[in-house]
């Protein structure tokens, strides 16, 4: 992934790396569901402005897909499930 040429900002690349750090192969795809707080901490960026903006930009560029409230943990209530990336 690091060799992949993309037009990303430094923060976007750090967020992408944080997501990749949590990704695992399941359901015939790579997926992860870290919290915004965890991504921010690992990417060393602010929560609201930078992480959320970076996630939107990564989706727009087709580098990630976001599925709202889709994390596959049956122990978590439907209204509390994190997004799947």
Image: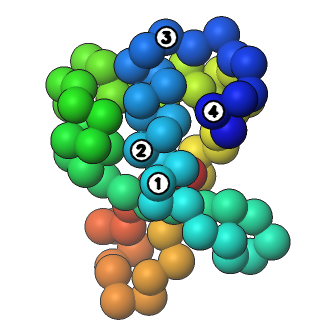
Q: CA distance from mark 4 to mark 2?
A: 12 Å
Q: Does residue 38 lie above or below 2 as drawn? A: below
**Between 67 and 33, the one nearer to me in the picture:** 33
Numbered disc 4: secondary structure: loop
Q: Which residue is mark 3?
A: 9
Query: What is the x, y in percent for residue 58?
Result: 58, 26
Q: Does residue 20 lie above or below 74 as drawn? A: above
Numbered disc 2: secondary structure: helix
Residue 21 showing in the rendered view = yes
Numbered disc 3: secondary structure: loop
Earlier in the chain: of badge 3 and badge 1, it is 3
Q: CA distance from mark 1 to mark 4?
A: 12 Å
Q: Which residue is mark 1?
A: 21
**Between 85 and 15, the one nearer to me in the picture:** 15
Residue at coordinates 44% horizontally, 88% vertically from top-left? 74
Q: Which residue is mark 2?
A: 18
Of badges 4 and 2, nearer the viewer stands 4
- Disc 1 + disc 2, Cβ < 8 Å: yes
**Between 63 and 20, the one nearer to me in the picture:** 20
Q: CA distance from mark 1 to mark 2?
A: 5 Å
Earlier in the chain: of badge 1 and badge 4, it is 4
Quadrant of the frame with the N terminus: top right
Numbered disc 1: secondary structure: helix
Residue at coordinates 69% horizontally, 17% vertically from top-left? 6
Q: Does residue 49 lie above or below 84 as drawn? A: above
């Amino acid at each position: 992934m690091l060799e992949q040429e993309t037009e990303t900002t430094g923060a976007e690349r750090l967020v992408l790396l944080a997501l990749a750090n949590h990704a695992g192969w399941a359901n015939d795809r790579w997926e992860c569901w870290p919290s915004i707080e965890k991504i921010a901490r690992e990417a060393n960026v602010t929560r609201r402005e930078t992480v959320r903006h970076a996630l939107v930009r990564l989706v727009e560029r087709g580098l990630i897909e976001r599925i709202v409230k889709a994390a596959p943990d049956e122990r978590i209530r439907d209204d509390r499930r994190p997004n799947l990336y």
